[in-house]
């Protein structure tokens, strides 16, 4: 077989493998993501025993630490609804009342239990819209 023909065949096989791997990576990344729910969405459609990601702000005056367990309420961005969360795990340094967070929770009785080491705080001002200059 001609050497230039072998190179073309190898190139086509290699490019085909790259396309297949890239497609698998894109498919995996999109199917692995879950949409975070706000507290009002969580209250409206929650099923016992199922895990949900909830996002919102830690309500003012709601955070208490009881030994290794933190108890706080997460409220909607507009402040209407909130859910109580009991969380035992590592709490990030920037965690505080008024800070936006994302945490994975499961319903247990009348409260929500946060899964260990799933609490993440969001940057408070990086993506806020600046007031127009006048």
Image: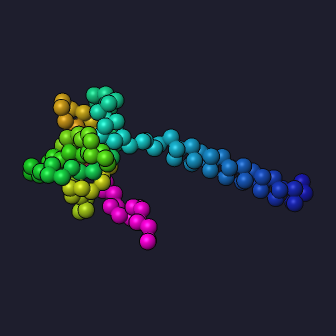
As drawn, the residue found furthest toward the front would be 134
- In this figure, what is the number of numbered marks? 0
Q: In the displayed structure, would residue 81 be above or below residue 16? A: above
Q: In the displayed structure, would residue 53 be above or below residue 107? A: below
Residue 73 location, quadrant: top left
Residue found 18% across the figure and 32% down from its top: 110
As drawn, the residue found furthest toward the left would be 67
Residue 100 location, quadrant: bottom left
Work out whether residue 68 can be spotted: no
Q: In the displayed structure, would residue 19 be above or below residue 31? A: below
In front of the other: 131 or 106: 131
- For the N terminus, the image quarter is bottom right
Residue 33, image x, y percentages: 46, 44
Residue range in magenta is 117-134
Residue found 62% across the figure and 46% down from its top: 23
As drawn, the residue found furthest toward the right would be 2
Q: In the image, is residue 66 part of the stretch drawn in magenta?
A: no
In front of the other: 126 or 21: 126
Residue 76, image x, y percentages: 30, 45
Residue found 67% across the figure and 52% down from its top: 18
Residue 77, image x, y percentages: 32, 48
As drawn, the residue found furthest toward the bottom would be 134
Work out whether residue 133 can be spotted: yes
Asked if residue 1 lies left or right of residue 42, the reply is right
In front of the other: 48 or 80: 80
Residue found 18% across the figure and 47% down from its top: 72
């Amino acid at each position: 077989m001609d050497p230039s023909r072998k190179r073309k065949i190898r190139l086509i096989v290699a490019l085909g493998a790259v396309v297949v791997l890239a497609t698998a990576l894109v498919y995996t990344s999109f199917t692995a993501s879950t949409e975070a729910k706000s507290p009002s969405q969580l209250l409206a459609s929650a099923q016992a025993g199922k895990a949900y990601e909830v996002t919102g702000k830690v309500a003012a005056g709601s955070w208490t630490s009881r030994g290794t367990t933190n108890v706080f309420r997460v409220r909607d961005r507009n402040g209407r609804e909130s859910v109580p969360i009991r969380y035992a795990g590592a709490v990030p340094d920037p965690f505080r009342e008024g800070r936006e967070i994302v945490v994975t929770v499961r319903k247990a009785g009348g409260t929500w239990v946060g899964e260990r080491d799933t609490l993440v705080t969001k940057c408070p001002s990086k993506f806020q819209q600046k007031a127009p200059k006048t």
